[in-house]
Amino acid sequence: VFGVFGEINAPLTKEWEVQFAARYDHYDQVGSTVNPKFGVRYQPTKALMFRGSASTGFRAPSMNDLYRPTVQGVTAILPDPVCMAENDNDLGYCAYDWDTYRYSNPNLKPEKSRQFSLGAVFEPNQNLTMSVDYWYIKKTDLISEIGDDVILSNLDKYGSLVHRYSDVTTDPVVSSICEYDPTDNEICYIELRKENRGGQKTAGVDVMVDFHDLRTDLGKFGVRLNGTLAVLSKQQTANGDPYISNLGKFVTDSVVQRWRHRVTMDWEYGPVSASLANTFYSAYDDQNSAIDTDTGTVVSPNRVKAYSIWDLSGAYQVNKAFKIRGGINNLLDTAPPFSNQAYF
């Protein structure tokens, strides 16, 4: 792998500055790419600044994506639609953790992206800085697998990836795994392959508020908030398929919470300092597809609660050359909220 990167920052006037950048990368077995970036900054006053940028991106497939040996695994407990049709939709009989074989792909292409951002920074005085930035990213040629739940729920489209004992052909790979039995229509295994599939769109707003160097008789204080409000997150299963949103709800194997933040409160008094921080993730709708094989029913719908943890740390400056620090992560020993999603 090698790359070359160049950048020009050009102050046009006291208020305006533009940026031009470009990067060339070359990957063996994958190819070469050139990705440009254009940025602009406008600062009409000392306290206010606007900024924006647009660029393209590139992610090469990893060595694992290209060459990893086949990995055997199992699905979550999922129903076989063929069995369900033949057995009066009996989940207790037709749901199982089916075997899977996961394959790499030496013919993968790189993922590509286009993105832009627009934002502003406001600094009314020396103790307060605030910023807000909107960003949008669109990826194409995603390196991904079709989820086993998606495969089983769309057999008309992806049925060729589901191998049954009754339809083992002369394919030497399949026949080496499954012993042909014309009377057994059960799933032998599901084939999962890395491919360049479809696209992904994400967008959000980053917010930052920073109070710093607030000096009082009790010491120096500071408070900083970094937060992200996600407003869009959706992905295609394959090229031409509709986009499916996982914003605020668990889909296949992932979820994007609508809001997350990190708040840090700092205090310093002479040689002593302390910091109290909060990390927060908002609630979301669970996967709600796990199956209880004892009762033959899908688990009750669940909403995963918000998760909030606190961290505490402190330090003592013994002298200019020596400082002692210590802390506790998850100060209140808060357990993560319950999720019934079927994968983990």
Image: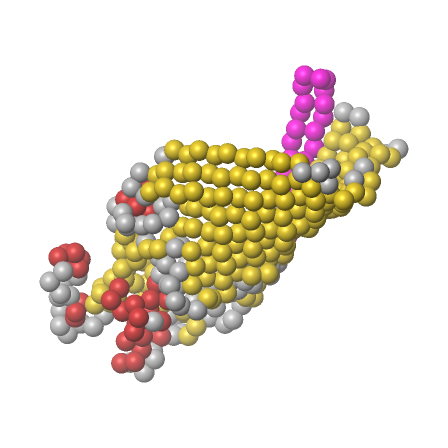
In magenta stretch: residue 205: no
Instruction: Depth check: give the residue in front, 29 or 64.
Output: 29
Instruction: Farthest residue to the front: give it.
Output: 12
Q: How is the image coloured?
A: secondary structure
Looking at the picture, how far across and down is residue 293, in whole percent?
37, 70
- Which residue shows up at 59% across the image and 47% down it? 53
Instruction: Depth check: give the residue in front, 245 or 76.
Output: 245
User: Would residue 74 be visible to someone looking at this image?
Assistant: yes
Looking at the picture, how far across and down is residue 72, in whole percent?
27, 53
Tell me if residue 199 comes above or below residue 2 in the rendering: below
| Left/right of residue 78 with respect to residue 208 in the rendered view | left
Stretch in magenta: 308-328
| Rendered-image quadrant of the C terminus | bottom left
Tell me if residue 172 comes above or below residue 18 in the rendering: below
| Left/right of residue 83 with respect to residue 332 in the rendered view | left
Looking at the picture, how far across and down is residue 20, in whole percent?
56, 40
- Which residue shows up at 59% across the image and 40% down it? 19
Residue 159 quadrant: bottom left
Residue 163 quadrant: bottom left
Instruction: Depth check: give the residue in front, 305 or 120.
Output: 120
Total labels: the figure holds 0
Instruction: Depth check: give the residue in front, 122 or 32.
Output: 32
| Rendered-image quadrant of the N terminus | top left
Tell me if residue 139 comes above or below residue 210 in the rendering: below
- Which residue shows up at 33% across the image and 69% down it? 152
In magenta stretch: residue 318: yes
User: Would residue 276 be visible to someone looking at this image?
Assistant: no
Instruction: Farthest residue to the bottom: give it.
Output: 88
